[in-house]
Image (cartoon, rainbow, N blue to C red):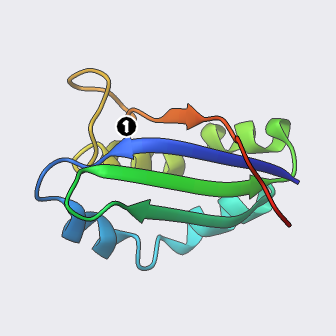
Amino acid sequence: MIRKAFYMEIQPGRIAEYTRVHNPIPEELAAIIKRHGVHNYSIFHHPGTNAMFGYMEIESEEEFAKIGSYECCHKWWKQMTENLVCAAPGADKAKEEEMNEVFHLD
């Protein structure tokens, strides 16, 4: 299992809406994520800041990359740009910065 982590920023005042639309995410989206080997997926918000941290475990990078081939995923990512900081105005996906693991204990 491959552990992946990433950093994002929520736009000020958008955490309640972001949380609402994630509880739950659309069934079709959840099925695609699971179908392509994603497990133990969580997103955390650091209170008092705009920092967001995501964590997931994936079976393979190749299967994980296939998630981006679905129209519903692109629609979801576009919807999330209303809540998250993007690299550029009009972007189709929020800015995510991959994080490097420095410690793990089973």
- Which residue appears at 32% of the width and 24% of the height? 87
Q: Is residue 43 left or right of residue 13?
A: right
Residue 97: percent from the left, percent from the top?
Answer: 49, 32
Q: Residue at x 56, y 74 (%)?
A: 27
Q: How many marks?
A: 1
Q: Residue at horizontal 81%, vertical 57%? A: 37
Q: Position of residue 94 (x, y in %)?
A: 37, 37
Residue type highlighted by circle 1: Ala
Q: Is residue 42 left or right of residue 8?
A: right
Q: Mark 1 sits on what residue?
A: 94
Where does residue 45 sit, x and y in percent of width and height?
36, 62
Left or right of residue 87, residue 54 in this image: right
Seen from this angle, which residue lies furthest left? 13
In front of the other: 22 or 54: 54
Residue lying at 70% horizontally and 41% vertically, measured from the top left: 102
**Quadrant assignment, res 66:** top right
Q: Pick out the residue farthest to the top.
A: 88
Q: Quadrant of the C terminus?
A: bottom right
- Residue placed farthest to the bottom in the image? 23
Q: Secondary structure at mark 1?
A: loop
Specify the quadrant that holds the N terminus. bottom right
